[in-house]
Amino acid sequence: MRALVISGGGSKGAFAGGVAQYLIEELGRDYDMYLGTSTGSLLVPHLAVNNIGKLYNVFTNVQQHDIFSISPFVQRKKGDREFVSIDFVNSLWQFIKMKRTFGESKSLKRLIKKNFTKEEYLQILATKEDVVVTVSNLSNNSVEYKSIKDFSYEEFCHWIWISCNYIPFMSLTEVNGNEYADGGLGCVVPIREAIQRGATEIDAVILKSEKMEGKKVLGKNPFSLMISLFGHLMDQLESHDILIGKLAASNKNVKLNLYYTPIDLTENSLIFSRNLMVKWWQQGYEHAAKKHGADSVLKDL
């Protein structure tokens, strides 16, 4: 059974989209099972119904207001360079209202239901072995994997949204008395879970560089420093997930193909810029082609 696994990575998910497009359209990979964490959970349902053109248009056109109902960030432009700073006004209002997060992501929940339809949900149930998203149960200090087979359309859309909620910058959500957040807080790359669910061959897209190049620039205020710190912790967790996945694949004789980004794409993956995401999608497609010894250019979608 063949599985596609996509790690967390926010806006860097565009790179994963490009890799997946090449694997599916050019190599003819037909996956039985799809597993995603955070941004990966947004991608896998659309890939499971093989609607890559729609996914490209949706993903590369996402803007901050499509994600955040209350954004903790301000996006600025200086020349050709886009950068981000903290929206202190919104963050202060969150404190005044006694909220526990700096921002809210209810807009993303609406976007998910708008673009992943009930018809597509039913198509997946009828044609695929499984689609699984990763969430973190903070109340029980555990990681949970939510299968499309176990939930209604409304419930599964809710779990996709929860898988993307990168706290403390996005929404914290309660389900059945437990509080949940981004799956990447517990498992960034669910390779081992794919193996435990019966995968015998896995293509895993890792939304970070295999080797860090250069020094990271740390934040100049407590908020941006927090983003840098969270990024560091997630990188360590991701490396652990990959190591565990490799060991599990070796023990179970599973063929594991890893697709890393060739460079570190961004320091803040919570910023969604169309120009950058279009570029990253192209890079993902071309990187997959190069890995397979081909010289291919992305066609217009």
Image (spheres, helix red, strand yellow):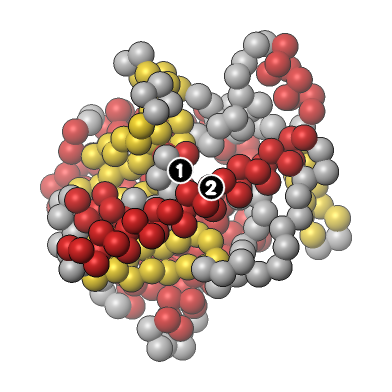
Q: Is residue 45 above or below residue 216?
A: above
- In this rendering, position of residue 3 left or right of residue 263: left
User: Which of the numbered marks, if any, corresponds to residue 184?
Assistant: 1
Give the image location of residue 296, x and y in percent: 46, 84
Q: In the rendered image of this protein, does residue 69 appear above or below residue 166? A: above
Secondary structure at badge 1 equals helix
Q: Determine contact: label 2, label 1, CB under 8 Å.
A: yes
Give the residue at x 22% y 31%: 151
Residue situated in front as seen by the camera: 24 or 268: 268
Q: Residue at x 83, y 43 (%)?
A: 220
Q: CA distance from mark 2 to mark 1?
A: 7 Å
Q: Determine the residue positioned at 40% across, 33% down.
A: 136
Picture quarter with the N terminus: bottom left
Identified at 55% across, 56% down, the residue is 12
Judge whether residue 195 can be spotted in this image: yes
Most extreme residue toward the top is 97
Q: Check disc 1 and give the amino acid type.
A: Gly
Q: Residues within 10 Å of mark 1 (few under 14, many from 20)?
A: many
Which of these two is toward me, 41 or 177? 177
Q: Which mark is residue 234?
A: 2
Ranked by sequence position, the earlier of labels 2 and 1 is 1
Q: In terms of secondary structure, where does tag 2 sit?
A: helix
In the picture provided, is 179 more to the left or to the right than 2?
right
